[in-house]
Amino acid sequence: MDAQRFSLLLCLLIHGFLSALLVTIGVSQSDKRSYVIYMGNPPKVGTATASLHNSMLQDVLGSESATKSVLCSYKRSFNGFVAELTEEEARKMAGMNGVVSVFPNEKRILHTTRSWDFMGFSQQVQRATSESDVIIGVLDTGIWPESQSFNDEGLSPPPDKWKGICQDANNITCNNKIIGARYYKSDGLFGSNDIISPRDSEGHGTHTASTAAGRLVNRANLFGLGAGTARGGVPSARIAVYKICWSDGCSDADILAAFDDAIADGVDIISLSVGSTTPTDYFHDPIAIGAFHAMRNGILTVTSAGNQGPRRATITNFSPWTLSVAASTIDRKFFTGVKLGNDVVYEGVSINTFDLKNETYPMIYGGDAPNPIRNYTSSSSRICLENSLDPNLVKGKIVLCDRLVSGEGPLIAGAVGALLRANSPKDVAFSFVLPASHLDLVDGSKIFVYINSTSNATATIFKSNEVNDTRAPYVASFSSRGPNPITPEILKPDLSAPGVDIVAAWSLASPVSQSRGDNRWVPFNIISGTSMACPHVSAAAAYIKSFHPTWSPSAIKSSLITSASPMSSGMNSDAEFAYGSGHLNPIKAINPGLIYDSNEVDYINFLCGQGYDTRFLRQVTGDNATCSAATNGTVLSDLNYPSFSVFTSSSTIVRRVFNRTVTNVGSPMATYRARVSFPTRTARVRVNPNVLSFTSVGQKLSFQVIIEGTMDASMISGSLVWDDGVHKARSPIVVFASIS
């Protein structure tokens, strides 16, 4: 038993004993209660902590009562103790020398590592008994099976439908949580750090898998940061691992091979946090191809939008049969303070786990330390490129760099730390290979002036601290934006989910910063990206699947899109091109009221309208798919999609008619009324009919949305909500005149 658990158990045992003792001798429990006396850092070596605590209590209670009142002492990481006190005794204790604070020992609920609770998706949400029958296929860098996030305690054997395998069982062990694991490397070329098995040597796949379906792990943290209970959205769901990514990237061949296996193995949801840097046609894109075949087999593929934001039309996963996810923030940010020798403190952004213990170090500007042996000039050394810094000038110092870099350059040169000034967004924090803080250009320039104003410039970098971000959620700057570069009539991304500063399981083969020279090996890590947002939605899709096992991929997708929480265009200037329909809301998604369903025939008709011919589509489907004269003229916007997107090209005059059909999955007898919000005077949106009356579950009714008028801005957006008083199925409406 580790020391921390032993201390906790001892506290509980003593507390129970004293409670019984107080009752025995007739002392009312209402007179005394337990208080925490917090005293900051541990005392110096040589001080007897327990005797100090007893001495303090004797001053307040008297010698006999003191011994009986101490419940437990803290003495390893910080100093303090818990004692049974009256209110008056607590006030006296608070005034004693060395006491930082005294507060009641309240009972608090466990806090998650944040993202799921932030969305209102607590540990106590309603669960379907069939959750353990849902299998999420994770196509990524593999998995670290020994992580506590993947223990299989209490789980039954895999469902009968499972047909997968555990490849290379000598290097990885599957269980009733990780029920399958495969790896793919078609070129047979491996890097020195690659592990030739489904085992994860990068950390990314372990992180995404645990975000989606990890078990509950208490006291998860990264060196004290982001502490809480780590858990996936569907802790009882099964994980099937398909390792497609290695140190040299993720090949198209391996992606397709993994899709091929995953579909045949029997997964229910595919989670894929991978993409290209440039958009390609649907059938030149292995992800779109694989996802199309998954859709045909009743499997929804959830993909990350990409990390090329905030420029428009940078989204690279956008096929209409996949669900594309943007990354948004949660209500937690990490800041890293920097204190200069003149006592001025600047607040930067990073995830800095290093503790310099307030010790100051000499400073130097990278531009003043070019490496002459390697023939570097100040133009390179100022941005701290690898080997560009002169170790003779940099060793033992904190370096000011003019770019947001990994920190490997300063580390190789022997620097103690790095201050990175850059005109880069500060809405996401990164881990670096050495103590570092990312500062904006204003503060960075002030630090530069300070360095040049004295011959003895010094600084220290503090360990990061957490603060509450009351503006959350908003879409991260890095998250790729729409519109859809191939089919602007299909709004992408579909929705957003937490993807910034997410705590989840990690591979012990990969250091915290994933950089050379980093010797921090941890079971949990904090990283950001649309890769982190994707598994949140994959989990929500699996959650819906557990309640509605017969729903089609498009039905699940529709429920997630129409139930998303609206987001503010004031906080996200790209509006729906940043966040799609809004922020993920898993609880509402299991009961959406109405769904916009589509099947394979609908997607074939869409592709006919996109310009594909019968011969081509028959090769794709292997059946008698046909593009007739009617389907060749299919309006792309008539795909039964749960959003409405109009691209007007150079024209300022707008007229578009959308045909949609919704299926009732709510109350048998229900009347839905259309509520339209479209804030412009030059165009209007009509819904015909504007009332839909259902008499049974499963009944389908059709309607039209007519948009007409003129553009008074480059982008106008609003929404259509079908409301029966209980359910509110909300779909975004976007009209725009420019893709870029």
Image (cartoon, rainbow, N blue to C red):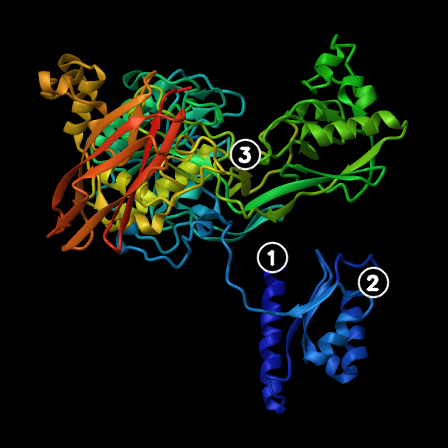
Dot 3: within a 10 Å radius of its alpha carbon, few (fewer than 14), some, or many (20 or more) residues? some
Q: Earlier in the sequence, mark 1 or mark 3?
A: 1
**Which residue is disc 1 drawn over?**
2
Q: Earlier in the sequence, mark 3 or mark 2?
A: 2
Q: Residue at x 35, y 40 (%)?
A: 538
**In the rendering, at what x and y percent does residue 535 appear?**
40, 39
Residue in front for this viewpoint, 101 or 244: 101
State which quadrant residue 565 falls in.
top left
User: Which amino acid type is shown beneath numbered disc 2?
Assistant: Thr
State which quadrant residue 682 falls in.
top left
Alpha carbon distance from label 3 to label 2: 40 Å
Q: Secondary structure at mark 2?
A: loop
User: Which amino acid type is shown beneath numbered disc 3?
Assistant: Ala
User: Which amino acid type is shown beneath numbered disc 1?
Assistant: Asp
Left or right, 728 with reference to 43? left
Q: Residue at x 53, y 45 (%)?
A: 471
Q: Earlier in the sequence, mark 1 or mark 2?
A: 1
**Which residue is disc 2 drawn over?**
47
In the image as oriented, which residue stretches furthest toward the right?
Answer: 455
**In the rendering, at what x and y percent does residue 89 appear?**
73, 79
Left or right, 733 with reference to 114? left
**In the rendering, at what x and y percent does residue 358 appear?**
79, 43
Q: Are marks 3 and 2 in contact (CB under 8 Å)?
A: no
**Which residue is disc 3 drawn over?**
509
**Residue 353 appears anywhere in the view:** no
Q: Quadrant of the N terminus?
A: bottom right
Q: Residue at x 14, y 55 (%)?
A: 669
